[in-house]
Amino acid sequence: MNIELVDLKNQYKKIKSEVDESIMDILSNATFINGPKVKSFTANLAKYLNVKHVIPVANGTDALQIALMALDLKPGDEVITPSFTYIATAEVIALLKLKPVFVDVELDTFTINCNSLKRMISDKTKAIIPVHLYGQCANMEDIMAIAQKNNLKVVEDTAQAIGSDYTFSNGEKSKAGTIGDIGCTSFFPSKNLGCYGDGGAIFTNNDDLAAKIKMIANHGQSKRYYHDVIGVNSRLDSIQAAVLDVKLKHLDSYCQERQKVAKFYNELFKPFSDLIETPSEASFSTHVYHQYTIKLKGIDREEFQNALSAKKVPSNIYYPLPIHLQKGFLNLDRRLDNLENTEKLMKSVLSLPIHTEMDDEQLNYIKEAIVSYLKTQKSLVK
Ligand SMILES: *Cc1c(COP(=O)(O)O)cnc(C)c1O
């Protein structure tokens, strides 16, 4: 049995003819950069997300950096973000000489804790980057209300939650990444909508921000060879767009496949609720399960991982060290709230294999490996 954390090989097999044709088209037309495929994919993605502007860029980290550059912040301005996230979210803040302010997350949803957010707002605060970690949205309604009240910009990091639906208390729905002033995503191969290399995109409904973002991503150029601002070179190439245009059509069914796996895991852990806490789904967001992440209660994480690994069932810790404890961030000008939940989660989370290609045979094999270990633990507890 070959279990993978993500199975891109078998996923490709199912869409091979479509993808191959789409890529071959680029090769024969030699439209490698800014070709028609990039335009059609971005238009299709804008339609899918119901957002006015999609600006394609080279990767998700660039998307975040360019989004912050478009907000005209000054060195020392503060940007609030959770510490319990992937490094890219905070890296771009530091890179632009802005001051990261780290807030805590909720223990059950792993997303921003709004009390911590409110506590950490100062005169210097200019923006918030909520992260839709593991595949479900942060509490955007509250975050947007807090942002509005304090005149802050909101940049959503939706690298892990593309396709997720947010429902407001009035019943209106929006796609993840289209609620804040700007949304950023990554098309890294293992993401829910992944290409076959690097890629990313920026979303906004604001025309002025869209114009600025386009300019910054293209060397600060307003007109060819006329550079109005300092920009960067960040492009999604046509071959990646060709892959993404095919995969976008499958995104909803990919999300459903992941949700099925999550349901299977939820069931299997039911008898072990004293040892394992399964992921909670927030009432306001669908969960697209980029990761299926459990919390261990009183069992040794390394030993559990080793037991699974002995049966060739991979697992991973996202992330073993929160940003505020990373060496590169220790001596940085920064502010921290009490990050009690973050530090608790760092020690107890574990992500299990979840992808679009899992069949019953694989799921039952994983179940066997998990259950046989947990049974030994249960008998120890008793
Ligand atoms: C993957 C990811 C990114 C960065 O995307 P890249 O395309 O790898 O640069 C940023 N934030 C989060 C939460 C991610 O998971």
Image: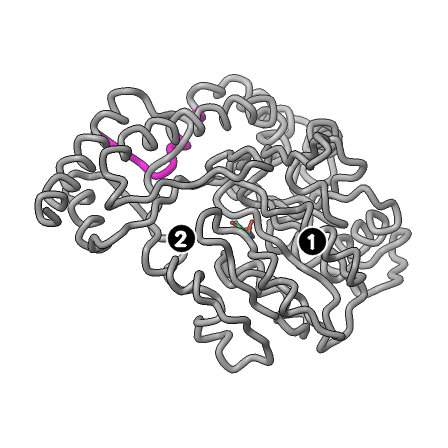
Query: Residue lying farthest front?
Result: 382
Magenta stretch: give its range.
1-12
Location of residue 335 in the rendering, given as x and y in whole percent from the top left corner: 59, 76
Quadrant of the drawing holding the N terminus: top left
Residue bearing mark 2: 318
Q: In which quarter of the image is residue 241?
A: top right
Question: Is label 2 in a helix, a strand or a loop?
Answer: loop
In the depicted view, which residue is nearer to us: 67 or 374? 374
Q: Residue at x 56, y 36 (%)?
A: 283
Does residue 309 sit above or below 119 in this rendering?
Answer: above
Question: Could you tell me how far apart the alpha carbons at marks 2 and 1 are, in whole angstroms?
Answer: 22 Å
Position of residue 121 measured from the top left corner of the image (x, y, whole percent): 68, 69
- Point 58% across, 64% down: residue: 116
Q: Is residue 63 found inside the magenta-colored segment of the image?
A: no
Label 2: how many Cα within 10 Å (few below 14, some 14–19, many 20+): some
Mark 1, ligand 1, within 8 Å: the answer is no
**Residue drawn at (31%, 28%), measured in percent from left and top?**
267
Along the polypeptide, which appears first: circle 2 or circle 1?
A: 1
Q: Where is residue 352 in the image (x, y as percent from the top left)?
A: 33, 41
**The label number, if any, that marks residue 372 in the structure image:** none
**Residue bearing the label numbered 1:** 155
Amino acid at dot 2: Tyr
Relative side of 367 to 78, left or right: left
